[in-house]
Image (cartoon, coloured by chain):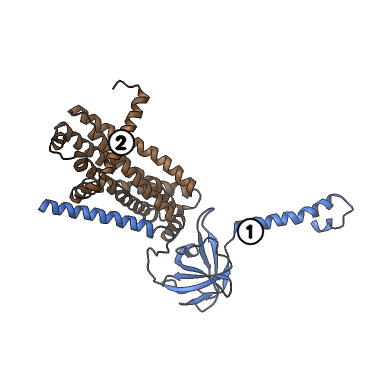
């Protein structure tokens, strides 16, 4: 029967589509390191950071605020105990001095992390497999606050004697 | 018929539960006729696909627009993807699909069964020792139950695409940041929550639709009333169940 056949084909298509959607949601969406957009075009350079904060694979790499590439992968180097970040930079940006520095920055107040490249002055340029030597880690808010409190705590006792005239180390406050 | 309101409500809940038990008891025998179920999956699912996809697209686009407008104020536009993904997976996908499903498929189930009843087709089946619940009600219930999660998943995927279309293509959020933030924020647990919700909603909407049809007054007016009740009862039920399930998932997380 023609009628049954088209009905079954329609149902089959619908069920297939539904399961494809389910499969997409369960496999691609949660945490998978799937690469969207441009494939592996461009050249890869590595940079070691003490701390990457919540930088993620796929985050942008920028120079002067313009996106020139993406973070390809992040892993821990167990010899140096540093985070080894592979950056994939588009081929058109081939003249980045090899003494440039990479720093991890935050977009806006709460935004995601990205890598900013500050150009150096060298005559030679970064190439495939190159290494960025000068890096600046992500600023971790907690450690910043800890430092602030540590500062206040160490100043605290100093200021107490400063109020009572006989103390000698009041000088230091000036 | 002259019960007071609380008693009538209680009686109704009891009747629906009994009807559900009748359906569940006949699922096994009904599976012997898969052709009937396939036809109902086609009616409830495949024919609802266009409205579901269209709605999903616009819901996703609106989320992209609104999310961008709000997050832009904090300079964190990347989170548009997180909002769209979590909002759609956990709440909007299952709930809106269930509401659309009640309007598109639930009403047609009720009126179809109601009309069969008013033209005494169901009685005729009983006269021939054919169980109408097994041959008419159960395939329709199962069709809705199977179609609903698939529709919800389709809705969600299309909505994610719609949000991406506005957020990334139109508003210019960086696509790498958009997807990496989204993937970092979404857990398998969130996907699971959406699937469980759509399964529950599928049972609720399909059950209400077949119950109202099967128990409608066998008059033109009665079928009309039953169809209206299907939309009202199942919509309220879906929203209520959604609240309960959201609360339950927050506790277990």
Colour chain A appears in: blue
The circle on residue B15 is: none
Task: Assign a secondary structure to mark 1.
Answer: helix
Front residue of this view, candidates A114 and A64: A114
Identify whether A150 is placed above or below B141: below
Q: In the figure, A110 relative to A36: above or below?
A: above
Can residue A113 be spotted in the picture?
yes
Q: Quadrant of residue B23?
A: top left
Q: Which residue is painted at 48% across and 74% down in the image? A: A45
For the C terminus of chain A, give its image quadrant.
bottom right
Residue A40 % position (x, y): 39, 71
Residue appearing at x 40%, y 64% in the figure: A34
Give the percent coordinates (x, y) of residue A149.
Answer: 69, 54
Chain letter of the residue carrying label 2: B
Q: Please give the name of the residue rendered at 18% of the width and 28% of the height, measured from the top-left corner.
A: B219
Between B166 and B105, the one nearer to me in the picture: B105
Q: Residues within 10 Å of mark 1 (few under 14, many from 20)?
A: few
- Disc number placed over residue B18 in the picture, else none: 2
Left or right: A56 with respect to A3? right
Q: Decide which of A24, A36 is in the foreground and name it.
A: A24
Same chain for mark 1 and mark 2? The answer is no
- Residue B168 sits in quarter: bottom left
SS for callout 2: helix
Residue at 20 percent of width and 50 percent of height: B32
**The chain drawn brown is chain what?**
B
Q: Which mark is residue A143?
A: 1
Mark 1 in CB contact with mark 2 (< 8 angstroms):
no
How far across and down, in percent of the image, does residue A102 sit? 54, 68
Q: Nearer the viewer, mark 1 or mark 2?
A: 2
Q: CA distance from mark 1 to mark 2?
A: 62 Å
Q: In which chain is the residue bearing label 1? A: A
């Amino acid at each position: 029967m023609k009628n049954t056949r088209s009905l079954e084909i329609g149902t089959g298509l619908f069920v297939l589509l539904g399961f494809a959607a389910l499969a997409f949601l369960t496999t691609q969406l949660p945490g998978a390191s799937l690469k969207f957009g441009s494939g592996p075009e461009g050249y890869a350079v590595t940079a070691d950071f003490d701390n990457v904060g919540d930088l993620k694979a796929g985050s942008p790499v920028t120079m002067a605020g313009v996106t020139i590439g993406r973070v390809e992968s992040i892993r821990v180097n167990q010899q140096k105990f540093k985070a080894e970040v592979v950056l994939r930079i588009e081929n058109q940006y081939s003249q980045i001095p090899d003494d440039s520095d990479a720093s991890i920055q935050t977009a806006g107040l709460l935004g995601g992390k990205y890598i900013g490249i500050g150009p150096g002055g060298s005559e030679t340029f970064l190439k495939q497999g190159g290494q960025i030597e000068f890096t600046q880690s992500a600023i971790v808010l907690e450690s910043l606050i800890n430092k602030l409190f540590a500062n206040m705590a160490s100043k605290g006792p100093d200021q107490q004697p400063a109020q009572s005239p006989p103390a000698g180390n009041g000088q230091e406050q000036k | 018929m002259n019960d007071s309101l609380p008693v009538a409500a209680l009686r109704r809940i009891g009747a629906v539960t009994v009807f559900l038990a009748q359906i569940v008891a006949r699922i096994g025998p009904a599976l012997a006729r898969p052709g009937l179920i396939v036809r109902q999956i086609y009616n409830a699912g495949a024919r609802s696909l266009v409205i579901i996809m269209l709605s999903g697209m616009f819901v996703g686009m609106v989320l992209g627009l609104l999310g961008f407008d709000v997050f832009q104020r904090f300079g964190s536009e990347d989170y548009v993807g997180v909002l769209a993904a979590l909002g759609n997976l956990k709440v909007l996908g299952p709930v809106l699909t269930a509401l659309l499903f009640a309007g598109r498929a639930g009403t047609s189930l009720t009126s179809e069964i109601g009309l069969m009843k008013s033209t005494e087709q169901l009685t005729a089946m009983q006269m021939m020792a054919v169980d109408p619940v097994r041959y008419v009600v159960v395939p329709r219930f199962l069709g809705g139950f199977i179609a609903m999660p698939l529709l919800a998943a389709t809705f969600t995927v299309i909505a994610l695409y719609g949000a991406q279309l506005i957020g990334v293509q139109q508003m210019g959020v960086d696509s790498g940041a958009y997807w990496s933030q989204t993937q970092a924020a979404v857990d398998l647990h969130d996907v699971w929550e959406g699937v469980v919700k759509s399964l529950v909603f599928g049972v609720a909407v399909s059950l209400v639709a077949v119950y109202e049809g099967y128990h409608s007054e066998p008059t033109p007016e009665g079928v009309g009333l039953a169809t209206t009740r299907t939309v009202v009862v199942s919509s309220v039920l879906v929203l209520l169940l959604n609240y309960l399930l959201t609360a339950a998932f927050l506790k277990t997380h």
